[in-house]
Image: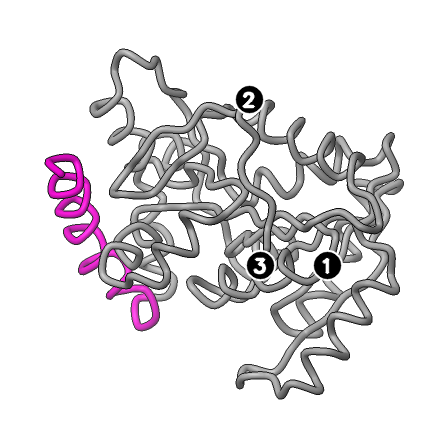
Amino acid sequence: MASQLPSAVPVLACAGVPIAALEMNEAVAWCIETAQSLAADSAGLDVHLCNSYTLALADDDHEFRALLNRAALNLADGTPVVWANRLLHKDANPPRSRVRGPSLFVNVLAAGQAAQIKHYLLGSTPETLEAMQREIAQRFPEALIVGTDSPPCRELTEAERLDQRERIKSSGAQIVWVGLGTPKQDVEAAGLANSLPVIAIAVGAAFDFVAGTVEEAPDWMQRRGTEWIHRFTQEPGRLWQRYLVGGPRFVKAVITRRSR
């Protein structure tokens, strides 16, 4: 069973899911300090980067919502999630900015160098993982990448899953970054936390952005909450449902679950 969210971290409910009220620097510090505190017999912790699509899926899927409710930490990855919490929880003075997955990834890599945090990269293609490792070595020369794994797109067999877990355990990793797409990566992060003494972080498209295989939106679009337009124009066939259907579902979930 994954560890529960420490009581010291303030939580705000958004669309029926507990979202940690943390700024980026606080989330980075939480990751580093928690990784340092893990022992061989510690329970693992799962971290999920929640955008409007994540919460729309959780509203429709009871099991997925239960997974997020059990999680160690859910962070507001999407600007609409930040806006919703600022409307719903004005008295709590919620964070004004999101904890963007790709930014959390590179910030933890940077901050973890001095602490010699050991990272494992799980997801994407072998080519993307190789390109990402080259970029990490150039930008963060003291970051410790102790293993990588590009699993097949199909469901793993039980033997394959056990082998994967053993490779991660043998690497000594403290943080496992999981980039498999929502909701698959969230299920995988929860499974890792249930079986290994690691922080498993479902980090979305961070691998592709860092590797340079997918172009990031300009900073001004990220700040104004219009990053989705940039991503949609790049991959309309894959992302149309996420944005054109998931967006309205998120708004509905915020309103209906607020009334409950």
The residue shown at (83%, 49%) is 137
Label 1–label 3 contact, CB within 8 A: no
Q: Residues within 10 Å of mark 1 (few under 14, many from 20)?
A: many
Task: Locate residue 27, reporting x and y percent.
Answer: 58, 30
Work out how far the residue at label 2 is from the one at label 3, CA to CA, in angstroms: 22 Å
The residue shown at (49%, 39%) is 100
Which label is found at residue 189? 3
Left or right of 124, for residue 18: left
Left or right of 196, for residue 22: left
Kind of residue sitting beneath label 1: Leu
Task: Locate residue 72, reporting x and y percent.
Answer: 54, 43
Q: Which residues are magenta?
A: 236-260
Kind of residue sitting beneath label 3: Ala
Which residue carries the number 1 mark?
Answer: 196
User: For the residues carrying marks 1 and 3, which lies nearer the camera in this image?
Assistant: 1
User: For the residues carrying marks 2 and 3, which lies nearer the camera in this image?
Assistant: 2
Instruction: Choose the circle earlier in sequence order: 1 or 2.
Output: 2
Kind of residue sitting beneath label 2: Ala
The residue shown at (30%, 40%) is 226
Which residue carries the number 2 mark?
Answer: 8
Which structural element holds mark 3? helix
- Please identify the quadrant where the C terminus is shown: top left
The quarter holding residue 150 reads bottom right
Task: Locate residue 43, reporting x and y percent.
Answer: 69, 49
Camera-side residue of 67 and 211: 67
